[in-house]
Amino acid sequence: MDTFQPAFSSWLNAPAHQQWLAAEGLRLLAFAKASKLPDGFGNLDEKGQLPANAHAETMNTARMTHSFAMAHIQGLPGFAELVDHGVQALNGPLKDAKHGGWFATAHHRDDNTGKAAYLHAFVALAASSAVAAQRPGAQALLDDAIHIIDTHFWSEEEGAMRESFNRDWSEEEAYRGANSNMHATEAFLALADVTDDHRWLVRAQRIVERVIHGHAAANDYLVVEHFDRDWQPLREYNHDNPADGFRPYGTTPGHGFEWARLLLHLEAARVRAGMLTPGWLATDAQKLFDHNCRHGWNVDGAPGIVYTLDWDNRAVVRHRLHWTHCEASAAASALLKRTGDEQYETWYRLFWEFCDSHFIDRCDGSWHHELDPQNRPSADIWAGKPDLYHAWQAVLIPRLPLAPSMATALGQLSQSAPV
């Protein structure tokens, strides 16, 4: 694998841009601290306050723990206690002590006692980052997460993750999802680094081979999201609920960008580990990025990337979500590092200019999570500002190598810094 230094002036090499990214990260972190609850972390509203009925959720607790761990690894004071709080919550009230695995909410207070691969991937990611941060209780959490993935979710026959089960694991959902497998790929890259076990890179490639090199490639590199248990596409899935926050109808350009970046991380990780690495990982990443830019950006006469497309590549849900643009900018930076192609510099700057103008909220803090089709702040799909993870990673990824994974890379940078 080659990495290129661009022959043109790049923001990635500009000290002022690097400083801007770091400052924006500090602003995001300061806002997110208010999400702490006794049993984990909850969802902040538009003003950065916890609503009166706020309760701890596993997804947000895991994402916050992962994010705060990366802040701590960098040497930012004030985050060690938050990482420890998250680890304790994931080892305690969010965990199913009877049957194993994790509930969606503390003490399963919302009666959602099912076990979802999506949530467990984030628990594994949080645990791996907390281990990289050398926090107490993190290794036990990591061991539990790996055990649950190995025992219940990973299907060696399919080369992918099963989707979900009921509380005691006796009933399995007859569905397979690209979204949960995407975040499992992200988690597996981190697990490979903190465990020094290459099987996670083997598993990550098997997921990518099925979801991207197989199904997405056959769909003009637009990600097929929903499948039955036999991995046959469910093209009409959620047709009547097209704006679902996790399983929307049609294709989701934001996931195309996210997958593009993950393919490059996987390629770099396998090369770094001395493993046989297929050339199609980089090729597929470029095609994912190019095709989702073509069909997702400015397709309805207004700037921004729409949330979803139908099977004829027409915009269905025209809202612009912040996470989509975070992933687009991160993917552009990764492709720029990998190829040195100036088109990715152009896209990288375009995405950040859009985020700066429309998403970054300098009045109430953090980022608006959603814009309506006219690029005005809205809350039709995602209310409030609960998500630190996407924007925080978006300001970190341009400053880090493609491998190792983020928490490990930050640790290596801190060890190599001059004293």
Image (cartoon, helix red, strand yellow):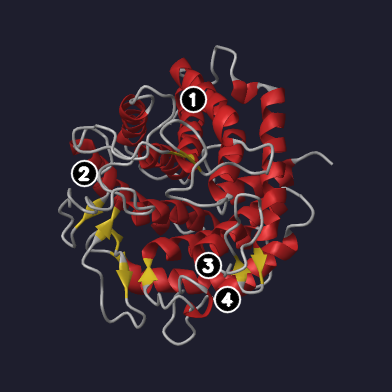
Identify the residue position indicated by label 3 in the image: 57
Viewer-nearest of labels 4 and 3? 3
Q: Quadrant of the N terminus?
A: top left
Identify the residue position indicated by label 1 in the image: 336
Left or right: residue 298 compared with residue 82: left
* Residue depicted at x 60% and y 51%: 407
Q: What kind of residue is marked 3?
A: Glu
Separation of marks 1 and 4 at Cα, in angstroms: 39 Å
Q: Position of residue 20 (x, y in %)?
A: 69, 30
**143, above or below 128, in the image:** below
Q: How crowded is mark 2: few (under 14 residues within 10 Å), some or many (20 or more)?
A: many
Separation of marks 3 and 1 at Cα, in angstroms: 36 Å
Identify the residue position indicated by label 2 in the image: 215
Q: Earlier in the sequence, mark 3 or mark 1?
A: 3
Q: What kind of residue is marked 1?
A: Leu
Tell me where residue 50 sits by quadrant: bottom right
Q: Where is residue 247 in the image (x, y as percent from the top left)?
A: 32, 53
Identify the residue position indicated by label 4 in the image: 91
Q: Earlier in the sequence, mark 4 or mark 3?
A: 3
* Residue depicted at x 24% and y 32%: 313
Q: Classify mark 1: helix, strand or loop.
A: helix
